Image: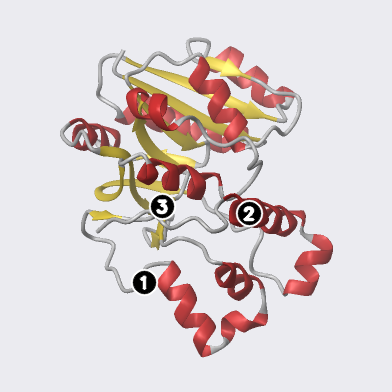
């Protein structure tokens, strides 16, 4: 089989249905399978998958097990030579998967390739980034990000000087949509299970670079993404008190920085 599509889902059957239907309606490829790995599965989601999509492999989970565990569960029952990992809030456009697949097949040194992500208003969502530093977290989580030095740092992290219209090697791409190969995963390994939420994609892409695979932002392929930044957009005090997603982000950042403490960043163009 050429392609396995692993959809990671969490408590949003309505968007999941739109995601699945977009694949079925827009992917013209023989030899692919869809696997849905669901976290904290609710009865509504399970019934929808059983009744509307009996041909799709469905992996429910009673607990919220995290992105990395969902990917692992899906990968373990997959058969494709290539593996597309997408969130259940991603909507596929026509030819978007085929373009990613053709590109990675023609460039054997590529480990991960990701599409341009758009909001439903057709506006660009930043989905390729430079590596985090501790200052990145501080500037994004405190009032210091509003200062000139903080804004400059965040703009650099988001690669705002780049027009996002051309193919480019990048430090890492957002885990919402990424295509890789079974061969590359066999060398790099799956997502580190120490990351339950946030930084899984940063760490994984870094490991691909460390194993001499390139990570590529590929804007010729476009997908829609319903993206809600649950851990941002509030004052730091309110967030720390009431927003558990912020705590998860900070915890994952600490895990990431400890893991790579003293290690040089992988070099690339």
Vertical side of 122 occupied by 195: above or below: above
Q: Which residue is mark 1?
A: 160
Are dots 2 and 1 in contact, CB under 8 Å?
no
In the visual, does 131 lie left or right of 45?
Answer: left
Q: Position of residue 149 (x, y in %)?
A: 51, 86
Q: Is label 1 in a helix, a strand or a loop?
A: loop
Q: Which residue is mark 2?
A: 258
Q: Position of residue 201 (x, y in %)?
A: 49, 45
Q: Earlier in the sequence, mark 1 or mark 3?
A: 1
Q: Is label 2 in a helix, a strand or a loop?
A: helix
Residue placed at 43% from the left, 48% from the top? Answer: 206
Quarter where residue 212 is shown: top left
Residue placed at 46% from the left, 36% from the top? Answer: 86
In this view, the residue in front, 137 or 127, is 137
Q: Image quadrant for the C terminus?
A: bottom left
Indicate which disc residue 172 carries.
3
- Of circles 2 and 1, the one toward us is 2
């Amino acid at each position: 089989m050429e392609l396995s599509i692993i959809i990671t889902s969490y408590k949003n059957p309505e968007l999941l249905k739109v995601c699945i239907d977009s694949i079925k309606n827009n992917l013209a490829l023989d030899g692919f399978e869809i696997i849905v790995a669901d976290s904290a599965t609710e009865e509504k989601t399970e019934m929808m998958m059983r009744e509307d999509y009996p041909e799709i492999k469905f992996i429910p989970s009673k607990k919220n097990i995290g992105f990395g565990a969902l990917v692992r569960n899906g990968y373990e029952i997959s058969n494709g030579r290539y593996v597309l990992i997408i969130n259940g809030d991603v909507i596929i456009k026509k030819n978007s998967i085929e373009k990613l697949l053709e590109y990675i097949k023609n460039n054997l040194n590529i480990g991960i390739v990701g599409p341009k992500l758009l909001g439903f208003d057709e506006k660009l969502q930043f989905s390729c980034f430079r590596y985090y530093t501790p200052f990145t977290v501080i500037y994004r989580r405190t009032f210091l990000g509003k200062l000139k030095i903080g804004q400059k740092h965040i703009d650099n992290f988001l690669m705002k000087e780049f027009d996002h219209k051309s193919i480019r090697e990048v430090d890492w791409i957002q885990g919402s949509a990424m295509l890789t190969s079974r061969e590359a995963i066999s060398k790099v390994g799956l997502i580190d299970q120490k990351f339950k939420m946030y930084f899984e994609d940063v760490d994984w892409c870094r490991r691909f670079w460390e194993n001499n695979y390139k990570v590529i932002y590929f804007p010729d392929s476009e997908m829609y993404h319903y993206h809600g930044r649950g851990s941002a957009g509030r004052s730091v005090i309110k967030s720390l008190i009431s927003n558990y997603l912020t705590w998860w982000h900070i915890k994952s950042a600490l895990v990431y920085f400890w893991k790579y403490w003293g290690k040089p960043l992988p070099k690339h163009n």
